[in-house]
Image (spheres, grey):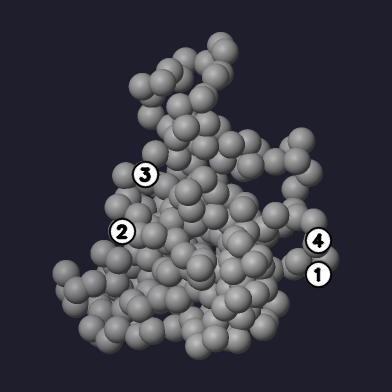
Amino acid sequence: MMWSGSDSDIARRYLAELLAERQKLGPFMPVLPQCYRLLNQAQNWLSSPSTASGLIVKQTIRVDIPVDLYPNFNFVGRLLGPRGNSLKRVEATTECRVLIRGRGSIKDPAKEEIVRGKPGYEHLNEPLHILIEAELPVEIIDARLIQARDILEDLLKPVDESQDVYKKQQLRELALINGTLRDEGSPMSAGSVSPFHNSLGMKRAKTRG
């Protein structure tokens, strides 16, 4: 679609409003993945085809995990979720690849010690951190990376277990996966759709090992 000068201004304002709404939805992304997906599609539409340069770029940003401040908090488990689904949803929603790296990123400590220092595992000598990678059109890559960073930074804020709604949702999802969900008084039955049901064609979320 070709934009005239005035139309282009309208499109830019609309895009700014979309980005603002998407940021507000950040904390609710795990249970509103389709809303995020629609906002991303709208952004892609505004950026293509005639308004896009066609230039694909690759960028990586790093987010440190505050294990030094909260040594007993299970950051990796919170990020991954049941079978890695929580991190996969972040990837599917933002079109970014998310990697957990550094000391403690491998589930088996014994295996981590064995592979430490070997080619490809140099990151194990660094503090625990996240790498967010994207290979996208230049017009949208910054917004996608910022979106992923904001979501992940929100998940890295420790919450008291009794008030951690996100963790409770993950436990519910795990019970649903294992077929052990028991929720008396809830209309959800064994055949119901989980609020975490993945219909986005998610790619795998990865830790090393």
Give SS at disc 2. Answer: helix
Residue at label 3?
198
**Above/below status of 199 relative to 63:** above
Residue at label 1?
68
Residue type at mark 4 is Tyr
Residue type at mark 3 is Asn
Which one is earlier in the sequence, the residue at label 3 or at label 4?
Answer: 4
Crowding at mark 4 (Cα within 10 Å: few <14, some 14-19, many 20+):
few
Q: Are marks 2 and 3 in contact (CB under 8 Å)?
A: no
Residue at label 4?
70
Which one is earlier in the sequence, the residue at label 2 or at label 1?
Answer: 2
**Above/below status of 52 relative to 44:** below
**Above/below status of 115 relative to 89:** below
- Which x, y percent locates residue 112? 61, 72
Residue at 83 percent of width and 66 percent of height: 69
Q: What's the distance in space between the residues labelled 1 and 3, CA to CA?
A: 33 Å
Residue at label 2?
41
